[in-house]
């Protein structure tokens, strides 16, 4: 039996309409873990509005709990059980390439597979996966965001984690996870998918711009957490 693909979507302050679009797929292999990381009553009402419109969908699990992004991600990994998962933002959405990644993992023991990524918003280019060779992960986030992981292996390394305590600045916790997996001896494989595996939005005022505005701080934190790290997290010129 094919393993389930869980799409993990932690959300705080995301437009409700975007969340409806983000959970569009009703493919029998896809299930969504939609986590509203909220306490304010206004946002709880938003969660209720989304629930009412998705109540007929058996492939959507909705949680409402203020616990922070990292914990919400890890709750999604737990929900994925022994299957696969992909993490996305509330304004992103998966593409058909995700099934090519799952088919690859069905027949290979890699910890994760990463595929073609289509940027939307400020960026419009499509990026194709390049196979990293060991230490190259310390220079660049080769898998980027179109990544399908084995949930059990991610739990083996402790899941997602932050490498700094400044909660106003995003971390790029996906790359932290990829480096943790690498240092634990796990490998990911590039799979050039004909269709994008993920449509990834880059917008003004979003997490990516926050990282770009604080790139020197983040690079230093990566160097502290991973002494071999010599890369640059993001090029700030994207937002010039």
Image: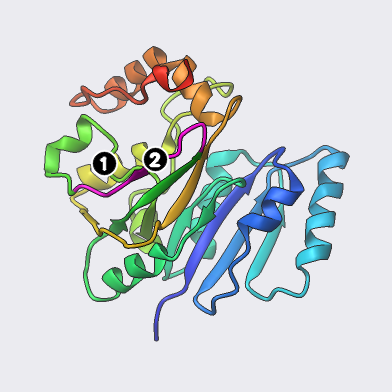
Residue lying at the far front of the rendered structure: 124
Q: Position of residue 133 (x, y in %)?
A: 12, 44
SS at circle 2: loop
Q: Is residue 134 left or right of residue 140?
A: left
Whether residue 165 is visible to the viewer of this picture, yes or no, is no
The residue lying toward the viewer, choosing from 33 and 198, is: 198
Q: Is residue 201 above or below residue 226?
A: below
Residue 126 covered by magenta stretch: yes
Q: Is residue 135 above or below residue 190?
A: above
Residue lying at the far bottom of the rendered structure: 1
Q: Which residue is at a point 75% across and 48% down the rendered structure image? A: 16
Q: Which residue is mark 1?
A: 142
Q: Which residue is mark 2?
A: 125
Looking at the rendered structure, which numbered label has been put on residue 240?
none
Residue 219 covered by magenta stretch: no
For the record, the magenta segment spans 121-130
């Amino acid at each position: 039996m094919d393993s389930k693909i869980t799409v993990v979507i932690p959300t705080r302050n995301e437009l409700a309409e975007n969340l409806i679009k983000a959970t569009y797929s009703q493919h029998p292999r896809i299930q969504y873990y939609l986590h509203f990381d909220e306490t304010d009553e206004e946002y709880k009402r938003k969660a209720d509005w989304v629930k009412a419109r998705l109540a007929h969908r058996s492939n959507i699990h909705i949680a409402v709990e203020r616990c922070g992004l990292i914990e919400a991600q890890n709750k999604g990994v737990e929900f994925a059980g022994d299957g696969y998962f992909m993490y996305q933002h509330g304004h992103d959405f998966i593409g058909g390439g995700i099934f090519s990644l799952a088919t690859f993992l069905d027949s290979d023991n890699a910890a994760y597979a990463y595929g073609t990524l289509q940027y939307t918003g400020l960026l419009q280019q499509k990026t194709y996966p390049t196979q990293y060779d060991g230490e190259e992960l310390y220079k660049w986030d080769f898998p980027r965001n179109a990544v399908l992981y084995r949930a059990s292996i991610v739990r083996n390394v402790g899941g997602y984690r932050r490498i700094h305590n400044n909660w106003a600045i995003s971390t790029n916790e996906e790359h932290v996870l990829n480096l943790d997996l690498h240092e634990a001896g796990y490998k990911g494989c590039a799979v050039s998918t004909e269709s994008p595996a993920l449509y990834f939005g880059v917008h003004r005022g979003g997490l990516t711009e926050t990282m770009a505005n604080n790139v020197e701080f983040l690079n230093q934190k990566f160097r502290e957490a991973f002494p071999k790290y010599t890369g640059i997290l993001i090029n700030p010129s994207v937002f010039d």
